[in-house]
Amino acid sequence: MKKIQALFRREWLQSFNTPVGYTFIVLFLLIENYIFFYGFGSNSFWDRKSSDMGVFFQSVPYLLLLFVPAIGMRIWTEEKESGTWEILFTLPLTEWQIVLGKFFSTFFYVIVTLCCTVFIPLTLSVLGDPDWGLVFSGYLGLFLLSSSFVSLVLYFTLFLRSQVISFLVGFLTLISFYLLGSQRLIDFFSSGFIKIFSIPSHYEPFRLGILDPRDFYFFISLDFLFLYLSVIRLRYKR
């Protein structure tokens, strides 16, 4: 555990060694606040005149499709570009410790960013009376969704050396997994079976305030699957 903590601390400090780490958070907050309070067309907070946070929990996943690959593109490629890739394998760390250290540092970065949006429900509490049960379940859903996004990006960018390509591959991967649950795709295959593997269909209950153990199991299983695949890939590279 101490070795994972040490790697976590190293990765976390590297995220804020340059202004880039802060810039991503600020950009995320500016875009999300604009979408929620001003929206597009007549879908602004002032037009809705409601303390409901449905728009927030609908829009954040789409921002995460861009945000997670943007911060995840450096997870492995920075090691390869800086020449510390080989050094990483000489350290007394197992593959699981390396993968978990990288995963938790990136995931925690996303969690901190999401927590910075908490002033939105706080503002709503001043202007109205938001449903705090829905707020809690919505944020819980976002945390689980983010963990799966990070584990997916962590695995697929492991094969690449360029940060730009890593971003593009990470973005396309998340888009592909997220669109897996689109109604058009379900109608095309004429089967609801595909919804079992759909990320949106397991996130939606959290947005509606429904805490179903099957949705927890889905996200945790998805995390474990791609973390395990990352470990297998590292063992092959080692």
Image (cartoon, rainbow, N blue to C red):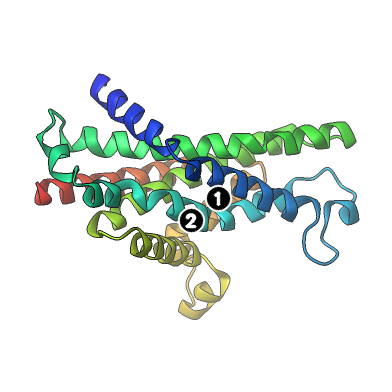
Residue 16 location in percent, x, y?
45, 36
Q: Is residue 104 above or below residue 182?
A: above
Q: Which mark is residue 203?
A: 1
Q: Which mark is residue 199?
A: 2
Which structural element holds mark 2?
helix
Residues at discs 2 and 1 in contact (Cβ within 8 Å): yes
Q: Is residue 131 visible?
A: yes
Q: Residue furthest top?
A: 2
Residue 106 location in percent, x, y?
41, 40
In this orientation, which residue lies closer to the viewer: 55 or 8? 8
Residue 185 location in percent, x, y?
50, 74
Q: Which mark is residue 149?
A: none
Q: For the point 68% across and 49% down, which residue is it?
A: 30
In this orientation, which residue lies closer to the viewer: 35 or 187? 35
Q: Is residue 1 above or below residue 181?
A: above
Q: Tell whether 105 sits left or right of 214.
A: left
Q: Amino acid at mark 1?
A: Tyr
Q: Amino acid at mark 2?
A: Ile
Quarter holding the N terminus?
Answer: top left
Which structural element holds mark 1?
helix
Q: Tell whether 233 sits left or right of 138.
A: left
Q: Is residue 212 visible?
A: no
Q: For the point 28% across and 49% down, which residue is it?
A: 76
In this orientation, which residue lies closer to the viewer: 202 or 8? 8
Compute the Cα span from label 2 to label 1.
Answer: 6 Å
